[in-house]
Each structure stands twice: as C-alpha cells, then as structure tokens.
Amino acid sequence: MNTPHFICPFCQWTSALVLIFLCGITRHNFSNLIAPIPLSVATTGFSPRGGGFGGRGGFGDRGGRGGGRGGFGGGRGRGGGFRGRGRGGGGRGGGGFQSGGNRGRGRGGKRGNQSGKNVMVEPHRHEGVFICRGKEDALVTKNLVPGESVYGEKRVSISEGDDKIEYRAWNPFRSKLAAAILGGVDQIHIKPGAKVLYLGAASGTTVSHVSDIVGPDGLVYAVEFSHRSGRDLINLAKKRTNIIPVIEDARHPHKYRMLIAMVDVIFADVAQPDQTRIVALNAHTFLRNGGHFVISIKANCIDSTASAEAVFASEVKKMQQENMKPQEQLTLEPYERDHAVVVGVYRPPPKVKN
C-alpha cells in the first residue's frame, strides 16, 4: 500500500521564488547584476597618459606631459624638473639644490629659498651669469629682488660674510638666451650696466634674468604686443625698477620712439616671418653704431617648407643687407628643435688701415 507524501507549504513557496529568480537572471543577463568598476578607481595614477601626477609638470621644457624628468635634486617625476620633456615617470623628483630639498608636486610653484650649505656658486665667463654647483650644476643669476620668484623658479641663498646673496635658477628649456649660454655661445653682450632692448618679451621669464644681469645700473626696455602677456610684464616691472615695459607692436618702432633711448644690445625673440625686418627697423631707430644684436630664429615660423639650415642662411643674408654683421651662429639643440641664435654687430666701425 502506497503512503501519500506530505509536502510542506513553506518549501513550495521557497522553490517557486528560486525558480522565478533564476529565470530573471537568464532573461536579463547575469552581468547586469555586477556594478562596473569606475575607470578612475581601476587605473593607477592621476593621469590617463601614465605616471605620476600627470598634468603639465613644472620646470619641464614646455610643461611636459606628466611631470618632466625631475628637478635639480635628481629623480624622475612629480612636479617637473629642470630638464624634462618626458611623460610622467615614477619617483618623487623635484628635490632642492642640495639634499633635503622640498619634494614638490604639481606645477612646481614656488619652492622657497634653499640654504646654500652644500652649494657653491661660481661666476660664469659671461659677466653677470653664474653657475651653481651642487648635486647637479645649474645656470643662475643674482636675484635683483631677493625673496621674490618670477615664474616658480628655484632659488638658493649663499652666505658671503655677514650677508646672504640669493640666486635664481635659469631654465634653458624656457629661455632661448639660457639655452644659447649653455650651448657655448661666445658672446651675449648683455652685462652689468648695459641698456638692452628686448623684442618679444612675452610674460617676462627671460626678461627677469636679463634684469638680474644688467643690475640696478642697467635698463631693459621690454617690448610685447600681446596685452595679456603685457599685464604680466607690467606687474613684473612694478617690482623690478630696471624694466620698462612697452606694450606695442615691434613692427612700428616710431610708436614708442619717445620711450626708449639709444641701447647697447637688442635681443629679439619674436618668431615672425618678417623677424629680421622687425629687428632691423628697431636697430636703425635705437641701436647705437657698434652695438650688438642677439636674434633667436625659429625656422618653422619663417618657412616651414625649407630646411632649418636653409632658413638660417637666408636670414643671415637679410641681416647683412641691413648693415647688421653676423659674427656667430649657434643651434639650440637639445633645448629647442630647429632654433638658432645669431649674434652680431650693427654698423661696425671701419677698420683702420696701417
């Protein structure tokens, strides 16, 4: 005789719920039940381009792509450094002029004043320029306004007797003049007490170092056409009394002829197709006979279809037609690609025959 089976009502309800749940998973795809991991959590670092804090670095060339190649104190990475074009990179980078410097992050803002216990400063062969020797050698200028940085550059104080002298690091990736000096240019003709006409002053990065070099007895007439950069230049001149900002187009020197006296040197970094003509117009108006010029030439801005060497040769010929005698030409690798600096004399005095 068969005994009837008793089925618990609770078990029936439980089985029914399980079947409904499984059917729902099959119908709606099991993967939808798992929350995706956000990309920002799944990837390491702060930048999708890799390494470090990303961003545009600090000292690195034009900012780099992720922090450049470290600072004066070695290392690769965060905050950009003196040398870099690299992408990100690990490490902590940034250091100071000597061991124990700040580590620094992000855009490499003001790092503060480093003590000079392990640092020695020597005069460069160009008067007014110095070499700071520490863990890594660096080009520096004596700060005309101690305690103030201009573009987040590093500073170091050296004790000389009872006094402390502050120097500012000069980055060749951000200054054509610094690149030329480190490249071994024979003469820059910019020295203490000189009067300099600077064409294409931008926000004043290199202008500030020229201001350091010429010192309180010299003058820097800084010409810049962009009103946005001009505001920065004017603010810089408020603290550096040897800078006279001129917010005007360098193609029209007659518009500012009443503001500028005769000068000893013209430095030009205007990056325009008619660059030599611009410099010549200003030389005819402001540069004394026997004065000198230093011109930075960017080949692509003059003729992007010709080779850099052909462009440089063409510009030299144009200078010769304007009573400008080139004496030296130097390319700016590895700091700038397809750039050259030409140094020369304007209307040189005639040679005396014996």
Image: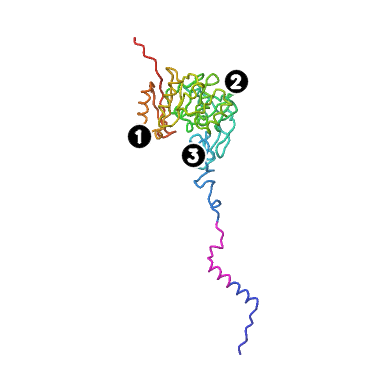
Q: Of circles 1 and 3, which is in front?
A: 1
Q: Circle 1: is it few (<14), some (14-19), or many (20+) Cα within 10 Å?
A: few
Spatial CA distance of label 2 from label 1 is 54 Å
Verify whether residue 25 appears in magenta: yes
Q: Circle 3: is it few (<14), some (14-19), or many (20+) Cα within 10 Å?
A: many
Q: Which residue is mark 1?
A: 307
Q: Which residue is mark 3?
A: 64
Q: What residue do we see at 60% from left, 74% from top?
A: 16
Q: Which residue is mark 2?
A: 161
The kind of secondary structure element at disc 2 is: loop
Amino acid type assigned to the residue bearing label 1 in the image: Ser
Q: Residue 250, how many percent across, how many down?
A: 46, 27
In this rendered view, identify the residue nearer to me: 136 or 299: 299
Residue at the far top: name it: 354
Q: Are marks 2 and 1 in contact (CB under 8 Å)?
A: no
Q: Main secondary structure of the magenta part?
A: helix
**Going from the N terminus, do you reach mark 3 or mark 2 first?**
3
In this rendered view, identify the residue nearer to me: 318 or 159: 318
Spatial CA distance of label 1 from label 3 is 26 Å
Q: Report the quarter where the N terminus lies.
A: bottom right
Image: 4 above or below 192: below
Q: What residue do we see at 55% from left, 22% from top?
A: 242
Provide the residue span drawn in magenta.
19-36
Spatial CA distance of label 3 from label 2 is 40 Å
Q: Circle 2: is it few (<14), some (14-19), or many (20+) Cα within 10 Å?
A: few
Verify whether residue 28 appears in magenta: yes
**Going from the N terminus, do you reach mark 2 or mark 1 first?**
2
